[in-house]
Amino acid sequence: MVREDGKRNFALRDSNGDEESVFSGNTPRQAALKAARRLEPGPSEDEADRVDIRLREKGTSKVHIYEGWAWEETAPDDKPDWMPNQITEANVSKQGIEHLEE
C-alpha cells in the first residue's frame, strides 16, 4: 500500500516467515538497502558476508528477495562533524520476487 508521501512499507521476514521489522521506501531496493545497513559489517566489500533479505510489501502477497552485504569504510574527508570516522556502507542485489499463497 502506498502512503500519502509516496513511500511503501516492507516487512523484513526471517527464515521462519516471521516479520520482525518494517522498512519504508519509494522502492523495494531502497528498503532493502536500509535493512542491509543493519547487517554485521565486514572489513571490506569483498570480504563481507552475503545474506538473504526477504521483504514483504505490506498490503500485498509479494516478497522481494535480495542478497545484501555491509562493510566498514572510512568516512569522506568532507564529512559533517557529527559523522563518525568509520561508517557502514551496504549494497543489495535483487534475486527475484515470490508470491505468497495465503
Image: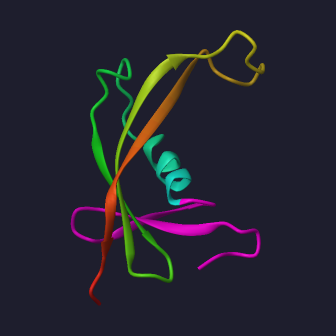
Is 26 one of the magenta-colored residues?
Answer: yes
Q: Position of residue 47 (x, y in %)?
A: 29, 21
Residue at 73% over, 18% down: 79
Horizontal side, residue 27 vs residue 92: left or right: right
Residue 83 % position (x, y): 69, 24
Q: Name the quarter where the N terminus is drawn.
A: bottom right
Q: Quadrant of residue 91?
A: top left
Residue 50, placed above or below residue 99: above
Is 62 part of what is drawn in magenta?
Answer: no
Image quadrant where residue 63 sits: bottom left
The residue at the point 75 percent across, 13 percent down is 78
Left/right of residue 101 with respect to residue 62 in the rendered view: left
Which residue ends up furthest to the left in the rendered image?
Answer: 16
**Over which residues does the magenta segment extend?**
1-27
The scheme the figure's colours follow is rainbow
Figure check: 86 above or below 49: above
List x then y, in percent, for residue 101.
27, 86
Q: Quadrant of the C terminus?
A: bottom left
Q: Residue shown at 36%/18% (left/top)?
A: 43
Q: Is residue 39 left or right of residue 28?
A: left
Q: Residue at x 66, y 14 (%)?
A: 76
Q: Farthest residue in the top direction?
A: 77
